[in-house]
Image (spheres, rainbow, N blue to C red):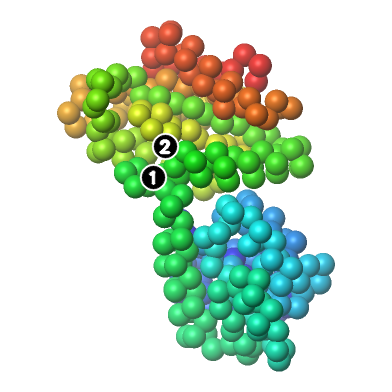
Amino acid sequence: MPKILIVDDNEKEIRRPLVRQLSRVFGDDKILEAENGQQALETVEREHPMVVLLDVMMPIMDGISACRLLRSKPQYAGIYVIMLTGREGGLAEGLEIGADAYVRKPYDIEELTAYVRKGLNQSKERSMPAMDPVTGLFNESFFMESLLVGELARAARYEMNFSVIRLRLDLTLNEGSEPDDELLRAVARLLVFRESDRVAYFGGYDFVVMLPYTAPTNAMAIAQRLCAKITATGFPGYDKVTASFGIASFDSAQSLLLQLAEDALNQAQIQGGGVVRLADSA
């Protein structure tokens, strides 16, 4: 679900009216708020908005600094940044550090809405290199190089729970053959169920679900639910499809997290498939 983040310290005169106005156009569930640049960065990490409206002048961290930090992180390259300003000048500085558009206060709501629509479209196009064209999920390279690195760092910094699930459909590919695209798309739709989760396709019949804020017991419950859902779903052309699951949770051995999950997945398949297994050291 595409999200829009509004960042302005003037709640009464700017932020709340803008939230109401954009909610009427794009829906209440798509609008996020923050009152300074620091809150904005935390919200971006947590919610992954496609468009960010940044006031230039704010306490704690201003919009220029927040924009500069956003543009320094490759995982946020797809975000469309609109700077909001009531001052004269400063436009060149914002554009040089990567802002996509400038809107002067007092803003014209139709003009601003047009920029937001343009931003949603452009953000989607920018994100395409990160996506697998068949499933619509994140591809392996973007997941490994951007999403996982960022989430692990955040989990360590804030001492948060964090888990990953590796799953593989219990099917065998013949040499030289390719997986069924329709089956992969159908499974992908089943795996996308929480806004905070990030799901990736790793090729073949392999998928990964990243679960921020999720302890091992909760990850186990989620995996069991997904396992049951796949087993209960009828896929055209297949009598029955099951999947095996391996789960690992965040600890000091960050680099081993996916390997631990894969080891647990392999053990689940040895047990006959359609099994959920927690990594021994998780």
Vertical order, 129 against 252 (above or below): below
Q: Determine which of the numbered discs, if any, sits on residue 201 in the image.
A: 2
Q: CA distance from mark 2 to mark 1?
A: 7 Å
Give how far across and how far down residue 27 sits, in percent.
47, 67
- Look at the numbered disc 2 and give the secondary structure of its residue: strand
User: Quadrant location of residue 98?
Assistant: bottom right
**Is 200 situated left or right of 253 in this image?**
left
Report how many numbered discs are placed on residues in the image: 2
Vertical order, 218 against 11 (above or below): above
Q: Looking at the image, which residue is at 82% across and 67% down?
A: 60
Task: Please name the residue that numbered disc 1 is placed on.
Answer: 132
The C terminus lies in which quarter of the figure?
A: top right
**Is 153 situated left or right of 1 in this image?**
right
**Is 55 situated left or right of 275 in this image?**
right
Give how far across and how far down residue 105 sits, in percent.
64, 88
Q: Determine which of the numbered discs, if any, sits on residue 3 in the image.
A: none
Give how far across and how far down residue 266 sits, in percent.
47, 15
- Is residue 263 something that shows in the picture? yes
- Look at the numbered disc 1 and give the secondary structure of its residue: loop
Q: Looking at the image, which residue is at 49% across and 11% down?
A: 267
Vertical order, 273 against 34 (above or below): above
Q: Residues within 10 Å of mark 1 (few under 14, many from 20)?
A: some
Give how far across and how far down residue 95 sits, in percent.
62, 77
Residue type, label 1: Asp
- Is residue 24 something that shows in the picture? no
Residue type, label 2: Tyr
